Amino acid sequence: MWIQACRMVGAGRWHLSNTQTQPRNCSETSGSKDCGCECFCAWGKPVSFMISSNPERLHESAPVAPTARLDIFLVYNGTTATSTSIGGGDQVMLKFIRLSGTKPDLLIPKSAKALVASPGKLFLTLGNLPLNLIGIITMFFVRILQGIFLSFKNRHVYDIAVGVSPYSVDLIPLWFWKARRKGTIIYHLIPKRKAVNWPTRIRFALAAVEQRLNMKLLAHVCDFLVAGNSFTKGQLEAAMPGKTIFVLDAGFDASAIDRVPEQPKNPNLACFVGRLTSQKGIFDLVKVMAALQKTDPAFQLVMVGSGPERDFLLAETKRLGLDNITLAGFISDEEKIRLLKRSAFFFFPSYEEGWGIALAEALYCECRCVCYELTHYRSIFQDFPTYAKLGDPEDFLRKFQAIQSHAVVPEQKRYLRQYDDPIIVRRFMDHLEQLSRYTP
């Protein structure tokens, strides 16, 4: 499949058209008759890397375009991803590894080794331990020590080294590995969080302390940063004036969604996709569904995913006697897309997101989406979602009821196409190639 991608100069956005089946010009996507775009052609096959129970599908890819071979090292040391659980940050890095054509060397846990297609050299650290507080602290401490030790065994100097998160488990090893340019991906800075129990309160407190320390370390270790959105970029520029910072959209796999047949929309069905933790607003959804059970008893919510507060969520639904919420757990890519395509609505009351991959997928599946308004959402998704006041379940319910009979506008799916994976990876490679041309 040949894909034409156009980048709007100044706007920094990409528009995508399949020249075999849906040729169109940029004005159809941007709303401008003269977008002044730079065009190139890239070749790639469909890729799947969403919440998956089939690791084989993680390898269905080809480079999006030929690029100059960069000698890249990725510190992917903090991931807890497995073949059945892949988070948004993991998705971004896995798509880069598969589609960039660079075959980077990686510092990676043994538990994530199977997720990497066509890698360069692998430096393996401790696999996953139980994901409770003690297990996470022990696991990350050992991985940090192993990452430092392995850096002394490999003194090769890379063109670019990138840490995939701003957390100590990635940032400290990055400090010790050798490269002409070093950078870190930061999809969002942790805001003030509200805990629902003591283990969560401790976890949130430790994360806040770690972030304050790591911001200082970032300024010392990295000469460039990759922000997940324009709001995060502004935060980082204020904290580290003069640092090279660029924005990279996370994107999603539009081709994988297109392969799944369309489903009849069920007007009494909404879904949620994400980690079952309070930051995702799952307990606000309980309040919304408790109200709807009284006024609209036929309406159902299916929640896809798992997380540390699943049991607490289940106990709360039982306490309130709610029979309109189904906890589906982890499901396959295709099952998830089928659910999105047959759900008339997507509920996403998340309190913090680096970008919003699940929201993008739902919009592309032509769901009517209701979400809390985060600072960066409108710059990415414009007014296609319906925004509710952050932290206000009653307003969330009102906004849903206001659009319950509305139809999806045709432009919604077409607009989201600009965030398809091959375009995002090409943009990332453009940035890395520019960075590699000089040393600060």
Image: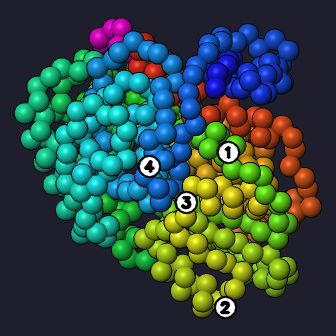
How far apart are the alpha carbons under marks 2 and 3? Answer: 29 Å
Q: Amino acid at mark 4?
A: Glu
Tags 2 and 1 touching, CB below 8 Å: no
The magenta span reads 435-440
Disc 4 packing (10 Å; few <14; some 14–19; many ≥20): some
Residue 332: numbered disc: 3
Q: x%, y% of residue 426?
A: 52, 23
Q: Residue at x 77, y 80 (%)?
A: 291
Tags 2 and 3 touching, CB below 8 Å: no
Q: x%, y% of residue 120?
A: 27, 31
Disc 1 packing (10 Å; few <14; some 14–19; many ≥20): few
Residue 321: numbered disc: 2
Q: Earlier in the sequence, mark 4 or mark 3?
A: 4
Residue 56: numbered disc: 4
**Main SS type for the magenta part?**
loop
Q: Residue at x 33, y 17 (%)?
A: 70
How far apart are the alpha carbons under marks 2 and 4? Answer: 40 Å
Residue closest to the eye, 156 or 55: 55
How far apart are the alpha carbons under marks 4 and 3? Answer: 12 Å
SS state under label 3: loop
- Residue 208, located in which quarter of the rendered image? bottom left
Residue 259: numbered disc: 1
Q: Is residue 258 left or right of residue 28?
A: left
Q: Amino acid at mark 1?
A: Arg
Q: Amino acid at mark 3?
A: Ser
Q: Amino acid at mark 2?
A: Gly
- Name the quarter where the C terminus is drawn: top left
Q: Earlier in the sequence, mark 2 or mark 4?
A: 4
Q: Is residue 46 left or right of residue 135?
A: right
Q: Nearer the viewer, mark 2 or mark 4?
A: 4
